[in-house]
Image: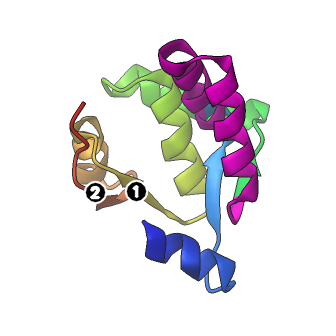
Amino acid sequence: VRSVFEGAEAQRHTVYLSLINLGEALYITERERGLVQARRTLGAVDQLPVEIVGVSRATVLAAAHIKACFPISYADAFAVVTAQDHGGVLMTGDPEFKPLAAAGLVAVQWLPRRRP
């Protein structure tokens, strides 16, 4: 993951993050670690070479369709649509994305799973 951010910093490629997924990361952080840590997390994300992608009606409709067809979270569907819309690769360790990758809906770079 570090090399991806280094590449983005050097402008070799762009890292995209859906606004929905940013919100998901922040609410989970706040719930588990408190508001102060959530604000620190947002500050850290704001320092990364990441383009935050807004949500349009078309994005919502595409995410809703993916959610209707595959057993993934609604927020995860936005990650898929963001990757699709930007011709990108979704970086995840979540096995719930395997059916979408197998169906050719999104290219995935598999990361090791974090232990809780």
In this view, the residue farthest toward the top is 31
Q: Which mark is residue 42?
A: none
Q: Amino acid at mark 1?
A: Met
Q: Where, by quadrant of the figure, is residue 69 drawn? A: top left
Q: Is residue 61 visible?
A: no
Compared with 71, 46 (above or below) is below
Residue at (31% x, 44% y) in the render: 100
User: For mark 1, does the 10 Å Cα neighbourhood hold few (<14), some (14 to 19), or many (20 or more) residues?
Assistant: some
Q: Secondary structure at mark 2?
A: loop
Answer whether residue 98 is magenta in the image: no
Q: Position of residue 17 (x, y in %)?
A: 63, 49
Secondary element type, mark 1: strand
Residue type beneath disc 2: Leu
| The label number, if any, that marks residue 111 in the structure image | 2
Residue 31 lies in the magenta stretch: yes
Q: Report the residue at 55% width, 31% height from top.
A: 25
In the rendered image, which residue does mark 1 sit on?
Answer: 91
Mark 2 touching mark 1, by CB under 8 A? Answer: yes
* Whether residue 52 can be seen here: yes
The picture places residue 98, in percent across and down from the top left corner, at 23, 45
Query: Observer-nearest residue: 74 or 6?
Result: 6
Q: Position of residue 105 (x, y in %)?
A: 39, 51
Q: Residue furthest front?
A: 36
Mark 2 and mark 1: span between their CA atoms?
Answer: 7 Å
User: Horizontal and vertical percent for residue 103?
Assistant: 27, 49
Span shown in magenta: 21-50
